[in-house]
Image (cartoon, rainbow, N blue to C red):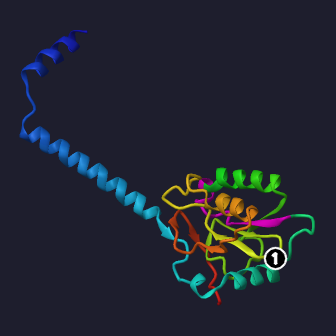
Amino acid sequence: MHWLKQWKASSSSTKPGVMHLAIVVLWLAGVGYAGYYFTAQRLVVFDPERVLLSLSAQDISSMAIASLGTKNAQSKGVIYHFVDNECRCNTYSEKHVKSLNKQAESDLYDVVTINLSLDNAPDFITSTPATLVLGEENELMYFGPYAQGAFCNQSTNTIGLVMKNYQQGFNAQLINHQAQGCYCQRKQPLST
């Protein structure tokens, strides 16, 4: 307690000078720059080689059907999750995947997870984690990442919106190639 009285006595008579304010400003600027730098390091373009620009929705659904097969006859569609066990970004999409799987189950969609380090996958998979949603007639509804941003969290639920719109008769056939977030590029070269 004695030290507290001394500190109060000494601090009440000492006012912050220009040097103190300069140090605080420099410290805040340094913290801001470090935050920006480390966030920018996490932001990667989902399709850096622009492979997906040359593909149509029909191309992607045809390639998916050729390499992955078709959906179950009783289901209303299929959701493919593409992951790579070595990708650190999978942890950010776990809640989103669980939420999508719950929605898929209630909407009678098949759910298939493909691990790129173990399974063969179509060449159009440019980065992971990614998802492909095909509708009742195996038509493309959505292909791309789960979300965008440094932590790729569930706040932008584009896939849920696409699925809801599909149930109401509208299919955007969305290929989300411009997203920036936490993604791991595929290791093998792609052919188009």
Foreground of the two, 72 or 135: 135
- How crowded is the residue under tag 1: few (<14 C-alpha within 10 Å), some, or many (20+)? some
Foreground of the two, 3 or 150: 150
Residue 20 picture location, percent across and down? 12, 38
Segment tinted magenta in the rendering:
76-92
The residue located at (62%, 56%) in the rendering is: 93
Quadrant (top left, top right, bottom left, bottom right) of the C terminus: bottom right
The residue located at (81%, 67%) in the rendering is: 77
Foreground of the two, 173 or 97: 173
Residue 104 picture location, percent across and down? 78, 57
* Position of residue 16 in the picture relative to residue 60 (left or right): left
Quadrant (top left, top right, bottom left, bottom right) of the N terminus: top left
Residue 116 picture location, percent across and down? 71, 71
* Position of residue 79 in the picture relative to residue 126 (left or right): right
Residue 30 picture location, percent across and down? 26, 51
Mark 1 lies on residue: 68
Foreground of the two, 74 or 26: 74
Amino acid tagged 1: Leu
Find residue 144 and report its image quarter: bottom right
Find residue 132 and report its image quarter: bottom right
